[in-house]
Image (cartoon, rainbow, N blue to C red):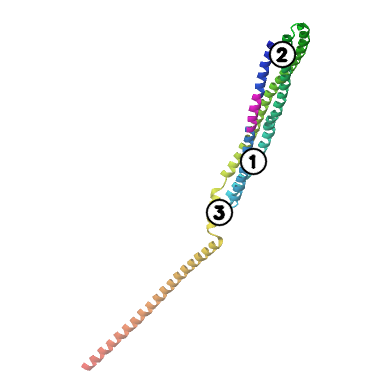
Amino acid sequence: MSRTPDARARDTQTKQIQENITNVEKHFGDLCQLFAAYVRKTARLRDKADLLVKEVSLYADTETPNLKLGLKNFADQLAQIQDYRQAEVERLEVKVIEPLKAYGNIVKTKREDMKQTQTARNREAKQMQQLERMRQRNPSDRQIISQKAESELQRATMEATRTTRQLEETIDDFEKQKIRDIKKIFGEFVAVEMAFHAKALEIYTTAYQHIQNVDEEGDLEVFRNSLHPPDYQSRLEIVRANSKLSLNRTGTSMSKSGTMQSRTSSRQRKRDDEEDDEEEEDDEDDLEEVTDDEH
């Protein structure tokens, strides 16, 4: 005896529901794994950024004052972003991953409902087969047997119809909830990401300003001064002072020497004039002696 058109329609319906549940189970599982990997990557990025903050801070301690301040402020802003990234990770776990993971149990429950419905339908099919065999074996008692078997078949068919109706209602609720959950989960994902990136953009802007406001000329002056420490400057000033004093002394000495030379020259000229006068007097005396001898 072939199955009734209603039974075949229920079988087709059940197959479609089974495919739908399997499809949700597969893709929700894949989405859950990928979102979880996304969150893990975000957490690792947070950890790497924490290391970067530490290194920038250590480097800042070795730099000139203005650059040090700029780097310290930059590191503080970057650390603040990682606090928001941690909040992003926690929210994604709660609002995205957990709801997707919950579909593992939801799908399991729907499969149990499918199993109950399938059991009722199998019972109906079994009753139909039994009725057919009884009719073939006892043609003389066909009427009595048929009434009893048909009564059992009727009960089995009613049970199969009832469970099928329940399955339809359950799977309808499942489909409705699935659509709502998808909208909510993906909406929460976007909201969490937008909140993080909006705040990160604000903080990154501040971090950029801190770096750009570093006083280059001020730090260059500090660096140049560091090449000539204070004791070096003091020695340099002493050398300059001594050089100036030495020059002044040299000038004074040369002035005195010139004066002395001038005085010596005057005295020498005076002595020469006196010697010339003496020579003239001697010549005059000699001339007078010669004149006296002639007379």
Residue with the mark numbered 2: 129
Lower sequence index among marks 3 and 2 = 2
Q: Secondary structure at mark 3?
A: helix
Quickly name the residue at label 1.
82
Q: CA distance from mark 1 to mark 2?
A: 69 Å
What secondary structure is marked by label 2?
helix
At a point 67% along the width and 20% down the height, the residue shown is: 17
Query: Which amino acid type is marked by label 1?
Result: Gln
Quarter-of-image position of residue 204: top right
Q: In front of the other: label 1 or label 2?
A: 2
Looking at the rendering, the stretch of residues picked out in magenta corresponds to 22-33
Q: Name the N-terminal-most of marks 3 and 1.
A: 1
Viewer-side residue, 195 vs 30: 30
Which residue appears at 71% of the width and 13% of the height? 129
Quadrant of res 130? top right
From the viewer's perspective, is residue 278 above or below residue 57?
below
Residue under the point 48% across and 66% down: 243
Instruction: Name the dominant secondary structure of the magenta segment.
Output: helix
Q: Which mark is residue 222?
A: 3
Give yes or no for residue 30 being in the magenta stretch: yes
